Image (cartoon, helix red, strand yellow):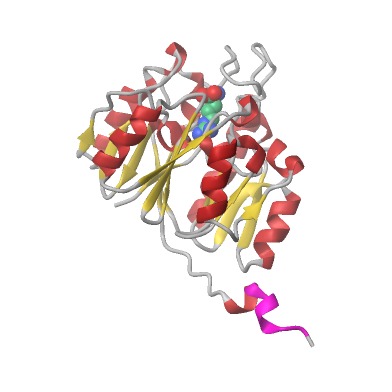
Amino acid sequence: MTSVLSRPSETVPRNPTRRHYVMCPPTHFAVEYAINPWMTPGAAVDLDLAFAQWDTLRRTYVELGHEVTVVEPVPGLPDMVYAANGATVAGGIVYGAMFRYAERVPEAAAYRLALAAAGLTRFAEPTFVNEGEGDLLVAGEVVLAGSGFRTDPRAHVEAARVLRRPVLGLELVDPRYYHLDTAVTVLSDTEIAYLPGAFAPRSRGVLAGRYPAAVIASAEDAAVLGLNAVSDGRHVVLPSAAAGLAAEYADRGFSPVGVDLSELLKGGGGPKCCTLEVRA
Ligand code: ARG
């Protein structure tokens, strides 16, 4: 007889909560420069397919009961589709982004304006480079904060003050996983999935200590950006190619929802990159 405890799906109630997401359509998406190893400048992009895939992601959220605010894309900003980088919003406070590379710098102001237009006027100006929710992941009462490629560790301290939450700094070491949201999925307030190899040894220790029961991603699932995913506490929207992660989530009582964003992967992004969560 199987023990009930070996079947977490039957014992852990998974209660989704309604979320508010900000997205930006890939109207001006292109791969024109390379600021991460996924990008090959001049790579052929099928814009119609990119839009269709992006819109499937948007409709997936709406069908799951979430609110989606769509912001106006700005010509000349091909990476603006990766809305997660536009800011970090918690407790109704917008901690502004400051991009590492010149090509993306103007996106910060565009997202600031778009969020203000959506009623989010409590804005904290950043002093240090930080790429929004790409590197600052709100996980319950803490913020998991990445550094190593984009976000300056001094921005972690600033984020803690502005967002009034303790921050757990994590150092990324693999250039393929240049933003924290490519190496960690926040599944619930207390649960995460991650790729240990993406982190410096000390940060691996921090993660293992705080999340002893975390889902450990395989190299294969991470390599399709499987960790670049969005959870509402029950449904985990992730790249459909990440089969191992989806099976593990189902085992734990989550409902994995696969989406294919192959065109946007050419810029180095997946579902989470295209999604900025507004936390009231
Ligand atoms: N091409 C973009 C960059 O390198 C992709 C950003 C992906 N966003 C993310 N949240 N990981 O900046």
Q: Residue 104, position in %: x, y?
A: 44, 18
- Between residue 32 and residue 208, name the one nearer to us: 208
Query: Could you tell me residue 84's position as x and y percent?
Result: 45, 36
Q: Residue furthest right?
A: 1
Q: Would residue 60 be visible to someone looking at this image? A: no
Q: Quick check: 112 left or right of 191? A: left
**Residue located at (60% from left, 56% from top):** 214
In the image, residue 30 sits, relative to residue 61, either above or below, namely above
Q: Residue at x 54, y 48 (%)?
A: 207
Number of numbered discs on residues: 0
Residue range in magenta is 2-8
Q: Kindly identify the residue that appears in the image at 67 percent across and 42 percent down.
A: 260
* Residue 254 placement: quadrant: bottom right
- Name the spot of residue 43 as percent of width and height, x first: 69, 16
Q: Is residue 275 left or right of residue 254?
A: left
Q: Nearer the viewer, residue 253 or 53?
A: 253
Does residue 142 appear to the left or right of 82 in the view shown?
left
Image quadrant occupied by the N terminus = bottom right
Residue that extends furthest to the left in the rendered view of this protein = 122
Residue 272 seen in render: yes
The quarter of the picture where residue 176 lies is: top right
Measured as percent of width and height from the top left, residue 102 is found at 43, 12
Q: Is residue 234 above or below residue 231?
A: below
Query: Residue 34 lies in magenta, yes or no?
Result: no
Q: Is residue 99 above or below residue 24?
A: above
